Image (cartoon, rainbow, N blue to C red):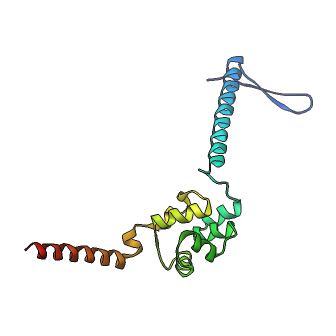
Amino acid sequence: MIKVQFIKTAGGEELAILPKSEYERLVKLLADEDVDTARVVRNAREKIASGLEVMLPKTVVDRLAAHENPIRVLREWRAMTQDELAVAVGITQGYLSDLEAGKRKGPVALHQKISRALGVPIDLLLPIAVSEQEADPARIAKRSQVAKDMVRRARARRD
């Protein structure tokens, strides 16, 4: 156990007196922490500069934390209209409106396009992305049926 002595100065300030070895240990811990903090800050700055990370204003983070639709929040932060974003990613404004309202789900590939158009990491949109099957089950079912029909016609031609 470390023996620490507390004293009070004439001015009323409280001081802690500790062994020199303990003082040196604490100074080393502080220096190591400063080195680690500097490394974390340097890495974050490099990621931001390279576009791998983005700095979001607190108001945007608060809205995302409140579970507002991330597409809408990020689109508004970037001062884009629904029409502008829809054109940028190759979808209709109505589809984008449905995505933002939560009426429809978009596949991961679409969310990747949206993240690129908004200049944000895909991680911000992945929580609302779904598989292509979940995004448009009717289209996938139709595609599957077309494939089955092609196989059936090919077998019929061989027979």
Q: Residue at the front extreme?
A: 157
Q: Residue 86, position in %: x, y?
A: 57, 74
Q: Residue at the left extreme?
A: 159
Q: Residue 95, position in %: x, y?
A: 52, 79
Q: Residue at the bottom extreme?
A: 94
Whether residue 68 is visible: no
Q: Residue 101, position in %: x, y?
A: 55, 78
Residue closer to the observer: 9 or 81 = 81
Q: Quadrant of residue 19?
A: top right
Whether residue 49 is visible: yes
Position of 54 relative to 89 (above/below): above
For the C terminus, give its image quadrant.
Answer: bottom left
For the N terminus, give its image quadrant.
Answer: top right
Which residue sits at x=62%, y=51%?
A: 51
Which residue sits at x=67%, y=44%?
A: 45
Position of 58 relative to 72 (above/below): above
Q: Quadrant of residue 67?
A: bottom right
Q: How many marks?
A: 0
Q: Is residue 23 left or right of residue 152?
A: right
Which residue sits at x=36%, y=71%?
A: 133
Q: Residue 63, position in %: x, y?
A: 64, 67
Q: Is residue 81 left or right of residue 90?
A: right
Position of 24 relative to 100 (above/below): above
Residue closer to the observer: 35 or 76 = 76
